[in-house]
Amino acid sequence: MKVKVSNIKVSCTDTTKLNSILAKALKIKEEDILKLNIFSKSIDARKKDNILIIYSVILDLSDKCKHVLKYKNVTKYSDSIIRMPYSNYPYTDRPIIVGFGPAGIFASLYLTRCNAKPIIIERGSRIDERVQEVSDFLNNKALNPNSNIQFGEGGAGTFSDGKLTTNVNDPLISYILNEFVRYGAKENIKYDSLPHIGTDYLRKVIKNMRADMQQRGAEFYFNTTFLGFEEQENGLLVKCSNNIEFKTKHLILGLGHSARDTFKMLYQNGVAMEPKSFSMGVRIEHKREFINNMQYGDMAKFLEAASYKGAVHLENGRSLYTFCMCPGGEVMASASEQNTIVTNGMSYNKRDKENSNAALLVNVDPSDYYKDSPLDGLNYQEMYEKKAFEISRDYRAPANLVKEFLNEEVASKERSVIPSYPHGVVFTDLRKCLPEFVYDTLRIGIPLLAKKLPGFDHDDALLTAIESRSSSPIRLIRDENGIASKYIYPIGEGAGYAGGIMTAALDGLKCALKITKDFNRISGKK
């Protein structure tokens, strides 16, 4: 007999006793629990002296345990995971996918299993070569504009926390999580309330995905840039660097939010797009131990590195919010263009580095930057990234400490929080590299956030600029079938339809489902 047991509360000191706790609660013997799978797991830290782990579990029980169904938190369970159809690709052309980030990966994965033998074009390198190129930038400031933290196999998320949280409630999310586990991610991502893979595991997962696709007929072109297209009588001629050309009726664009040159080319070729809101701000960095104690108190030693999330809405109409929080992580140098500063956060699976950091962002609306072109947001981002570089002119990032920042002063050096940014920081007035409204919102909003997260405004907390690539400032306009222009299918974060690994993967998957005509079968539409 298979049942789901919900809302099991376990002290954070007793998580190894889950079987005996369940047996006692259900009035059965431990040996009657034939199999236990965790369905969901979350932390209730409202009472710092009694932090609880909240479980829902799936149990295989012996037949003599039918009485457990009388309990309100116990129900019969049947597997509801979507069974993907993988119908045979119904066209004669091979689909072309540009970009092998989360959106491109899941579009490619599904199409490969439908025997479409897709062709994947990626301007950056394979994972192993890309890791070396990123290392060369972090250690020697030698930036490869085509293969870096933004571009290359796996996309920008490869050098991040590998966070899999999403506010989207879609049954396909469980399919995506199961695929990550199939290719090497840990099982806990399927049930943790705040799942993450970690950059170290994510690199392995993506390599395994690519190898499987290649065995099934997918063809990869790394270090190859999409340069343009020419509409022909019955499809597109896709033009790439190295004099490579392809013909297709399905050009899927999973470009990522940093492919500025490609967006400009698409605009010049008449692909419809519009400006959209995005965010700008800084990375805030505390000691990991401090954040752990802030969230969990004395119970921190029994728990993994603590996360947090906060937002405040100000009278000036702006919002300040945390994003992409990286417990036990590092602030990364994430530029994709020469002489610019871009920051992001990254964590390994263990999240055991000295500091914890998060983006601290302010909303930027089209009215803040729009003049006469949907590309104005790209130019706005780049202008401030260049301003940030000009402060040191050597890739050191602009920074300040919270105490001095709030007092409109400049710190002379770090105190207890040692910057993790690999090129080092230079303490400066952050007005020099942030829009005035972003600077003002940060100063007003940080103390307000500290009312929700006591200690968040610690004097020694470090602010590192500039965080400018949290989302795309443009949206490629597409119809209900996912088509932006004849034969062109924009997907993912760069196209303006996602905000993170999971939503990008979901968008790419749904594009493939629509192309293969499987979407209606899964969604129940006629």
Image (tube, rainbow, N blue to C red):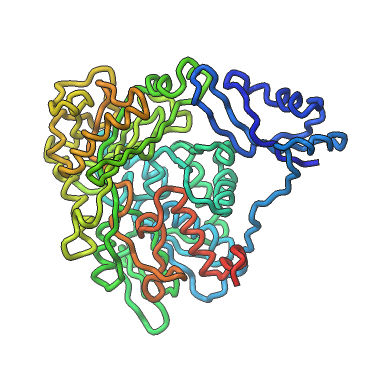
Q: How many numbered discs sit on the rendered protein?
A: 0
- Residue placed at 28% from the left, 55% from the top? 473
Q: Is residue 337 above or below residue 140?
A: below
Give the farthest residue toward the front. Answer: 315
Query: Can you see residue 280?
Result: yes
Q: Is residue 459 above or below residue 341?
A: above
Image quadrant in which you'd find residue 75: top right
On the rendered structure, is 287 left or right of 63? left
Q: Is residue 43 above or below residue 203?
A: above
Q: Where residue 448 sits: x, y (%)?
A: 29, 31
Give the farthest residue toward the right. Answer: 64
Image quadrant in which you'd find residue 411: top left
Give the farthest residue toward the bottom. Answer: 233
Q: Where residue 10 sits: x, y (%)?
A: 62, 24
Q: Quadrant of the N terminus?
A: top right
Query: Can you see residue 144?
Result: no
Q: Where residue 257 sits: x, y (%)?
A: 32, 53
Image quadrant in which you'd find residue 310: top left
- Residue placed at 42% from the left, 54% from the top? 100
> Nearest the camera: 200 or 257?
257
> Nearest the camera: 65 or 206?
65
